[in-house]
Image (cartoon, helix red, strand yellow):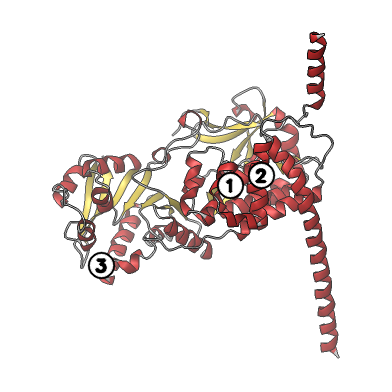
Amino acid sequence: MKYNIIILQLLITAIVFPSIAHAYLDAGTGSYILQLILAAFFGGLFAIKLFWNKIKNLFKNLFKSKKDNNIEN
Amino acid sequence: MKTDCIIHSSFRDPSGFLFYKNGQIFRQVNTSYKDNYDLLINSGLYKSLSDSKLLIPHQEADINLAITDSAYKVLKPELIQFISYPYEWCFSQLKDAALTTLEIQKQAIEHGMILKDSTAYNIQFVNGRPIFIDTLSFEKYNEGEPWVAYRQFCQHFLAPLSLMSYKSISMNQLFKIYIDGIPLDLASALLPLRTRLRIPLLSHIHLHAKSQQYFSDKVVNHGNRKINRLSLLGLIDNLETGIRKLKWKGMNTEWADYYDDTNYSSASFNHKKEIVSELISKNKPAVIWDLGANIGTFSRISSSKGIRTMSFDIDPACVENNYLECIRNNEINLLPLLLDLTNPSPGIGWDHSERMSFVERGPADMVIALALIHHLAISNNVPLDKIADFFSKISKMLIIEFVPKSDSQVMRLLSSRKDIFPDYTQSHFEHHFKSYFNILTSTNINDSERTLYLMQKK
C-alpha cells in the first residue's frame, strides 16, 4: 500500500513538474510566471501604441497633402 | 603576449568559447551551435547588427585552429582594446549598454532570433560606444516561448540603473559583489517607495521580486501558456521605456567643479598642457592611461592625437561629464572609466579570474598621473615607495607631477590634520621613484611650485 502511494506521488510529480526547455540560463519560475502575466498586459498596451502611431501618421500625411494642395491653389 | 589557453571567463556557454593562440584571440563555435550560427548569418541578422556597429564583427578563420574536436567553426573577432566592466562605468554608459542590448534584442526578433542571455558583461566599449561582443548569444526564436534572459536583464540593467537614479550613484559597485547583477529582492528593498508608482519599476523589479520569492519553493505546471510575438515586443518596449526614463539627478559632486576651484593660473595650466603634449608626441605611446583624469581635459590631449586613451577617475560625476562630452563630440579614442586607485577593481568571479583586476589589464605604454600624488600620499597615507612600486606595475612610461607641500592644494589637505609626512619631499620622491624608473626629464611648471617628470620603467 505504501509502495503504491510512493509510485503515485512520483507519477504526479512527473506529470506536474514543468518540462522547461533546455535553456542556457536558469530563467526562474517566478520570472517565468510574471513574464506570462506582464507580457499579456504590455502586449495589449503595445498594440494600442502601434495602432495610435498609425493613426497619427495617417493624420500627418492627410494634413501634409491638404497643405500641399492649398499651396498649389 | 598571453600563452595559448582558453580565456578564463569563457566557460559557461556550451555553444563555444574564446581562446588565445599565437598571441591572438579566437572564438570556437561548437557543433551544438551550428544551426543557430548559420541562422545568425543567413537571416541577415549578423550583417544588420555589425553594419550598425551593434555587434562585434568577426572573420571566419582556419578550422584547424580549434582546440577541441567539437568545433564547427573558428572565428576571429575584432580585438577589444580595453576590457571594462559595469562597476567601472558611469550612469550613462550603463544606460547606453542597456538600450543597446534591447535594440539588439528587437532586431534579433525581427530576424527570427532571440538573445539567450542579457548580461551586462556582453557589452564592451569600442571606439567610445557600447557594442555587443557575444556572437554566440543568439538563438532561434520560436514564437510562443518566453524570453529566458528577462530576469537577467532586470538584474544587470534595470535594477542597478534604478538604484543609481533613485538611491545612490555608487550602487553599480554592487556588481563587484553580485556576479550576476543585483538580486531583485535587494533592489526592491533598497528602492524608495515612490518607485512603486512607476509602472516599469513596479512590474519588473518589485512584482518580479515578489514573484520570485513566492515561487521559490513551488513546483508549477506551466502548461500550454504561451507569449505571442506582440506580447514579447510589448514587454521589451516597456523595459525600454523604463530604462529611458531613468535619469541621474544631482550630477554635482566635490570634483565636478575642480577646475574652477583650484587656483591654477592660466599660465601654469597652459604650460603644463604644452609639456604633456610635447612628451606624448615625442614618445608616441600606443595606449595611454590618464589616472585621476577628472573630466578628461588632459586625456583629450592624447586622444586628439589619435592615441587610444583610458580616462580614469574616482568621481562618478566626472566620468559622466567626460562620457557625455565624448558622445557630443563623437570621440572614438577616449574611454572614461571609474577607478579608485586606493581600491582598484579586483579579480572576481569563479576562481578569482572571470573578471580581470585593474593591474591585469596593463601595463599601459604610458601612464599620466597629474595632480594626483598628493592625494595618494597625503589624503590616503600611501608611502611614496609604494606609490612608485604600483606605478611601475602598470606603466612602461610615466608622466607624473610632483606637488610639493608648498603648493596651495597640499596646504589645504594639511590644514585640518597633523603633518605626519616628513618624507613627502621632492628629493624623497625622486629617490623612491628611481628604484623603479629612470627619470628622463623633469620640468618646473611656470607660475607654480610643481614639477613634471617623464620616467621610464627600468
Which residue is disc 3 drawn over? B268
Q: Is mark 1 on a helix, strand or loop?
A: helix
Amino acid at the residue labelled 2: His
Q: Residue at the far bottom: name it.
A: A73
Q: Do labels 3 and 1 share a chain?
A: yes
The amino acid on which the numbered mark 3 sits, given as a three-letter code, is: Ser
Which part of the image, by quadrant, shows the C terminus of chain B? top left
Question: What is the chain letter for disc 1?
Answer: B
Query: Which one is earlier in the sequence, the residue at label 2 or at label 3?
Result: 2
Contact between marks 3 and 1 (CB within 8 A): the answer is no
* Residue appearing at x 78%, y 52% in the figure: A41
Could you say which disc has been placed on residue B208 in the image?
2
Q: Find residue B241 and report its horizontal and vertical position in percent.
A: 67, 58
Q: Which residue is drawn at 16% across and 48% down?
A: B420
Q: Visible in this render: residue B118?
A: no
From the image, tell me which residue sits under label 1. Answer: B188
Q: Is residue B339 left or right of residue A40?
A: left
Look at the numbered disc 2 and give the secondary structure of its residue.
helix
Relative to A54, does residue B347 appear above or below in the rendering? above
Contact (CB < 8 A) between labels 2 and 1? yes
Please tell me whether mark 3 or mark 1 is closer to you in this view: 1
Disc 3, SS: helix
